[in-house]
Image (spheres, rainbow, N blue to C red):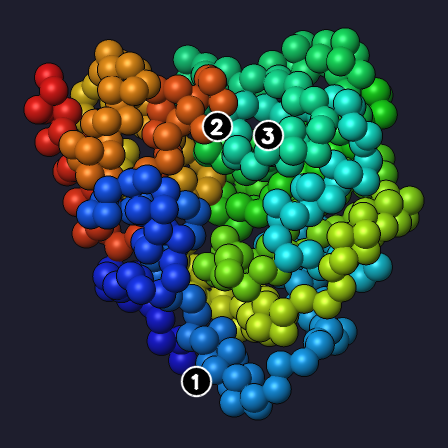
Amino acid sequence: MAERNLDFDRVIDRRNTQSIKHDFAKEFKMPEDVLSLWVADMDFETSSYVQDALAERTKHGIFGYSEARASYFEAVSNWIRNHHSWEVQEDWLIKTPGVVFALAMAVRAYTQPGDSILIQRPVYYPFTEVIEQNERVVVDNSLYLGEDNRYHMDLDDFERKIVEKNVKLFLLCSPHNPVGRVWTRKELTAIGDLCVKHGVIVVSDEIHNDFAFQGNHQIFASLKEEYKEISVICTSPSKTFNLASMMISNIFIPNPSLRHQFCKEINAAGISQLSVMGLIACETAYNCAEEWYQAMITYIRENIAFTKKYVEEHLPAVKMIEHEGTYLVWLDFRQTGLSTEELEDLIVYKAKLWLDSGKIFGDNGKGFQRINVACPRSVLTEALERIRKALQEVS
């Protein structure tokens, strides 16, 4: 049986499929005719092997409580070994209905109300939400944009904030969303050593780990033996294979004490078995969808290059931040001279685009927009053309 779903140029109408990305503009107070390139799912069909496995399972017609067999761990561990050179043990694995859920469970497991948790803005906005909504305190070690057009960590500020704010927990985004960094071994060991030194637990959101276009993704816990003792590594097939609604994530916690605390919070939240469809989709994807993954990665790599070329040639007042990982491109509009409100108006009402406004990732994201390039190139071209025309109208 051959992989069928390799035509990434094909535009698929996702309307009327209960898609958050395409069916809920009105509920999000957006014009209903916007072109959507915001939330991080792809406008591509998943692997036909996954499609077929799910279709076959539905034929049975009974969807009672389900659990994974040993073959599930074998599929997940083989993928991690083959793609990221990390050997995981089965007892480290805890399955959750999503990485954001896991972040929230970690916040509750390892800190108390009023404790300080460190993040690096501009960063995926649920990081802030799971801290604040659990009555903890956000401590921001802001990333800074260097002369190389990449974001970097301020290590002096990182350690100073840990000490001054008595930080208990660090939420690491790796690869980083939205700024597109694939952190180097040197960068990760620098912060890792500081976390070991000061007894800070690291929850590493590595959901985009299969999207490294420059450099190689480094799994935090794999870098030094002592990092295993402070690490919660969050992975999922959801970004890699476009399975977000399957609600399945694989969390690895080597330290037995940290694992026990995490499981206690999951039990307190009332979560036990997960969706049988998520289990099947994950196992099938990791076992069978390598061809689809490689073709998809190649297509997105080309979309990133296309976006960079287009911005450089047609959007002189816009700068695309050097892109290393994820399929979410970070665009800098600050040289347009538009205020945050004017930029929002231009994108939403003049260009008729639904992107993710940089302001939701933190104050240092103002003046930026995040665009999802995991879509057919014709759609991406249309979006960039709309930006060009809108900027011409206001210049």
Name the residue furthest bottom: 60
Q: Say left or right for 111 vs 104.
A: right
| As drawn, 330 above or below 22 | above
Tell me the kind of residue under disc 2: Phe
Which numbered tag is attached to residue 361?
2
Nearer the observer: mark 1 or 2; the answer is 2
Which percent across, then down, holds residue 128? Answer: 59, 30
**Residue shown at the point (15%, 38%) measured from the top left:** 385
Badge 3 marks a residue whose secondary structure is: helix
Q: Say left or right for 393 vs 232.
A: left
Name the residue furthest left: 393
Which numbered tag is attached to residue 128?
3
Badge 1 marks a residue whose secondary structure is: loop
- In the picture, the quarter occupied by the C terminus is top left
Which percent across, then down, holds residue 139? Answer: 66, 19
Q: Residues within 10 Å of mark 2 (few under 14, many from 20)?
A: many
Nearer the observer: mark 3 or 1; the answer is 3
**Residue shown at the point (10%, 31%) measured from the top left:** 389
**Residue shown at the point (26%, 63%) measured from the top left:** 13
Tell me the kind of residue under disc 1: Met
| As drawn, 24 above or below 308 | below
Tell me the kind of residue under disc 3: Thr
Name the residue furthest right: 257
Q: CA distance from mark 2 to mark 3?
A: 9 Å
Q: Earlier in the sequence, mark 2 or mark 3?
A: 3
Q: Earlier in the sequence, mark 3 or mark 1?
A: 1
